Image (tube, rainbow, N blue to C red):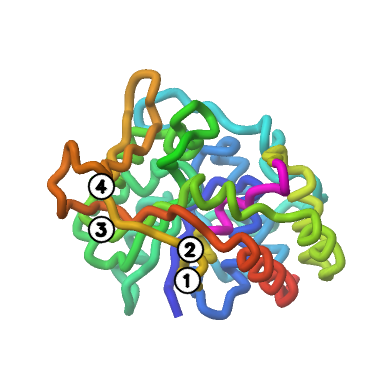
Amino acid sequence: MRQVILDMDPGIDDAAAIAVAVNHPDLNVSLITTVAGNVSVDKTTKNALKLLEFFHREDIPVAAGASKPLKKGFADAANIHGESGMPGYDFPEPTIKPIDDDAVTAMHKVLQTSSQPVTLIATGAYTNVAALFQTYPFDLVNIDEVILMGGSVSGGNVSSVAEFNIFTDPDAAKIVMEAPVKKTMIGLDVTLKALITPETMAAITQMGKAGNMLSHIITAYGDVHEGGKPMHDVNTILYAVDPSCMTVKDGAVDVVTEGPAAGATVWDFQHRWHANDFVNATIGVDVDAERFNEWFLAQVQQMNA
C-alpha cells in the first residue's frame, strides 16, 4: 500500500481525485495539503474538508498552504471551477477544521515519521512542494516519487505553451523540476485524452450518493472538450495505482519562468541543452482512454459516502 500526501487546490477535478484516493484500498492518504490555484486557499481548504466529511474520512488531516505563488501575482480559475471551486452540489459547511501546522510543516512531519517512503501527489500549483524542498531538503530521501499533474510537451491550456498549474507558479515548478527526486509529470498530453465520456457520466449518476455528488460537480465543470470532460487530476491517482494505463518516457524537462512562454515545460528530447543521458522526469505522453473510463466507473461504484 502506498503512503500518500495529496497537495491540491480543489477544484472540481481535484475533488474527483480526492474522492478516488481516500476510498482506494491501495492508498493510505496520510495528509491533504491545500494551495491557492483553482480558487483561493481558504476555499480550497474548505472544499477539502467538505469532501473528507462527505466520505467519513475525518481521520485524514488537512493543512492549509500557500495563498499566492512564490513571485508572480495570483489569478484563479473561477471561470472554470466556479466561485466556490466546487459548485453543483450542496455540501454542508464542514464541522472539522484544518490542523494548526501549515502545509510545509505538516508534510515535513509526515516525511520524518513515516515508516515507509511517501508518494507525494501534487495537482495544484507547486508552491507548497517547492517550499518543502527548499526548507527541508533532507526530506527528499523519504519521498518515493512525486507525481505531478501539470505541464505539457505539446501545447498549453492557458497560453499556447503553458498548462495552468505550471503557469500559476512557474518559479515553484522550476524548483520542483530541478530537485533530485523521482518525478512523473502527468500533463495535458495525457489528461486531454482521458475524457469522461457522456456514457460514463450517465452511469455515474446511478451510483449512489457518491455518484450523485460527482455527477453534479462534474456537470458544473467548465472545462469542456469534444468527446467529454477532462478529469485532469484523477489521472495522477490512476498512475499511482495502475501505471500500465499510460505511456511514459524519460527525459529532461525545463520550466520557463518569464516572457511570453512563461509556464512552458520544455522537453529537451533533441539533447540541445542537456547531456544525452540526463533525465530529471518521467513524462506521460499517452493514456488508454477506454481503460481510464472503465477504471473511474469502478472507483465510483465502490465508494462509501
Depth order, front residue of 124/228: 228
What label sits on residue 252 in the rendered view?
A: 4
- The disc, 4 or 2, on the residue closer to the chain's N-terminal end is 2
How far is disc 3 from disc 2 in space, using C-alphas?
A: 21 Å
Q: Residue furthest top?
A: 259
Q: Residue at x 68, y 30 (%)?
A: 79
How far is disc 4 from disc 2 in space, using C-alphas?
A: 19 Å
* Residue identified by numbered label 3: 181
Residue 209's x, y, as percent? 82, 67
* Residue identified by numbered label 1: 244
- Disc 4 residue type (three-letter): Ala
Depth order, front residue of 21/67: 21
The answer to whether residue 134 shows anywhere in this view is no
The kind of secondary structure element at disc 4 is: loop
Q: Residue furthest front?
A: 270
Q: Residue at x 54, y 66 (%)?
A: 238
* Residue identified by numbered label 2: 246
How far is disc 3 from disc 1 in space, using C-alphas?
A: 22 Å
The kind of secondary structure element at disc 2 is: strand
Depth order, front residue of 91/280: 280
- Disc 2 residue type (three-letter): Met
- Disc 1 residue type (three-letter): Ser
Q: Is residue 133 magenta?
A: no
Residue 162's x, y, as percent? 45, 32
- Disc 3 residue type (three-letter): Val
- The disc, 1 or 4, on the residue closer to the chain's N-terminal end is 1
Whether tag 2 and tag 1 are in contact, CB under 8 A, the answer is yes
Residue 133's x, y, as percent? 27, 50
Magenta segment range?
226-235
Residue 46's x, y, as percent? 63, 48
The kind of secondary structure element at disc 1 is: helix
